[in-house]
Image: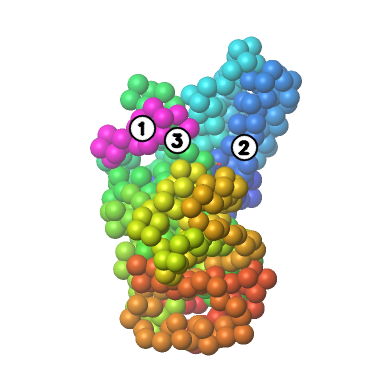
Amino acid sequence: MIVMKFGGTSVESETAIRRVTEIVRAAEVRRPVVVVSAMGKTTNKLLAMAREAAAGRRDQALGLLDELRLDHLRHGLPLAGAESADLERFIRSHFEWLEEFVKGLAAVGELSLRSMDAIASAGERLSSLIVSFAFRAAGMRAEHVDSRRVIVTDTRFTEARPLFERTYAALKERVAPLAQEAVVVMGGFIGSTLDGQTTTLGRGGSDYSAAIIGAGIDAEEIQIWTDVDGMLTADPRIIAGGHRVKSLSFAEAAEMAYFGAKVLHPATVLPAVEKNIPVVILNSRRPEAGGTRIASEAVPSKNPVKSISCKRGITIVNIRSTRMLMAHGFLRRIFEVFDRFTTSVDMVSTSEVSVSLTLDNTENLRAITDEIRSFAEITAENDHALVCLVGENIRHTPGIAGRAFQVLSKLNVRMISQGASLLNLGFVIADRDVPEAVAALHREFFSELDPAVFD
Ligand code: ASP
Ligand code: MG
C-alpha cells in the first residue's frame, strides 16, 4: 500500500483532477490510498465566508457560498460521468447544510473555533467525494472514506491533535482492508473528536493527514504530489539552473526547511519519520520528473553538499557586555529576554565580550532592545541573509569550509556556524550579495554531480 496525497493546486479544477486520475491509475497496482486537500483556495474562501457571516454581512457570505457551490458543480460534475446526478445531489445537499450554517452564524453573530472547523471541513469533504466519483467514472474501483470516521482527535478545534492509538486502530480496521480491494479516497486536514465533533489539524494539515494515514496502514511509501519537481540544489527564486536532488535524509530535509527551503518540513510528516516510511515529493503537472525521495538513510553521494538553502531578509543583533568580559549569567539573561518575547533566534556566535545572533522576526525587537539596554550595548543591522550548505557528508569531508570561504573571499562574511548536527555549514552575508554568493557556491559544489543523487 502507498499513500498519495494531492494538494490544493493538484485538485483545483476539472483538468487538474483528470491529471490526478491518470497518475493514480498508473499506480493502481500499488494499492493507493489517496488523500486530497480542498480544491484550490476553497479553505480560504470558506473561512472568509464564515467571518463575513459572523460579522453580520450575510449577503456577502451567501455570495461567497454561491461562488463555491458553482465552482464545485462546474468542475466536479463533468468528472462523474454516468453518476453525475448522484454527485450533484451530494454537492447540493452539502451546500444546503452550509447555507443553513451560514445563516445561523449571521443570526448569532459569533464564530466559535468549533464552528470554524465545521465549515472549513467542507472543502475536503467535497473534494474527496468529487475525486472518488472521478476515479469511478474513469473505470477504477474507488471507495470514499469520511476521514472523520477514522482520524480521531482531541478537542483543540482548528489545531486538533490526533489520538494516535485510536486513529491507528481505526485505520487498520477500516482503511487497510478496503485498500486491498479499491482505491480509497479520503480528505486531508479533517478529523473528529471522540464524541463526533468535526475538527481540523491546522492550516496546511493535509500533509500531516497523509503521514498519519500512511503510518496507520503501514504504507510502504507516502507520496506528496505538489506543483514543483521536489527539492533542488538551489532555490529557483535566487538562481536558475539548480538540479533536482533525488534523495535526501529526513535530517537533511529538516535542515533545508529550517533554512528557508519551501516544499516540505519533516515535522509535518513526523508520524512517517517515526515509522521509517519514505516520503516522496512529486510534481502532479510533470509526473515524469521523478521528484525527491526523503528517507531516514541518505543514498551515499560523492557530493558532500546536497543543497544550498537561504533565508533572506534577516536581522543581525549584536550585543556587547558593558564590562570588560562577559559576566557569568550574561547569555542566560539575553536569551531570557528573547524567550519572554517569543522571538526565536536562528544563529548565534559569541566572543569574549560580545554575542551576535540572527532573527527573522523583528516584531518585538524594539521592546527586546529596551530591556537588554539595561545591562548591555545592543545594535541591530537589517538586510542580511543566512546561507547554508546542507549535506550529511559535510561532517566527513575535510575542507568544505575552506572551499566555501575561498569562493566567497570577496564578500564580507559576518557570522559563521556549523550546527551541532554537523550536516550544515551556515554563514551570514549582506542580502544584496545573495545571488552572487549562491551562484558561486553552486559552481563550486555542483559542477560535478553524482548521478545517483542528482538529476
Ligand atoms: N485545505 C487545508 C488548507 O488550506 C489543508 C491543506 O490544504 O493542507 O489549509
Ligand atoms: Mg497545502
Q: Which amino acid type is shown beneath numbered disc 1?
A: Thr
User: Can you tell which of label 2 and label 3 is closer to the viewer?
Assistant: 3
- Dot 3 crowding, Cα within 10 Å, few <14, some 14–19, many 20+: some
Residue highlighted by disc 2 = 44
Q: Which mark is residue 153?
A: 1
Question: In x, y percent, where is residue 410?
Answer: 62, 85
Cβ of disc 2 within 8 Å of ligand 1?
yes
State which region is magenta: 152-168
The magenta stretch spans residue 162: yes
Question: In x, y percent, where is residue 332?
Answer: 38, 53
The Cα–Cα distance between marks 1 and 3, rounded to whole angstroms, is: 10 Å
Q: Earlier in the sequence, mark 1 or mark 3?
A: 1
- Dot 1 crowding, Cα within 10 Å, few <14, some 14–19, many 20+: many
Of all residues shown, which one is farthest toward the top? 107
Of all residues shown, which one is farthest toward the front? 323
* Residue at the image position 48 percent from the left and 87 percent from the top: 403
Residue highlighted by disc 3 = 159
Q: Which amino acid type is shown beneath numbered disc 3?
A: Glu
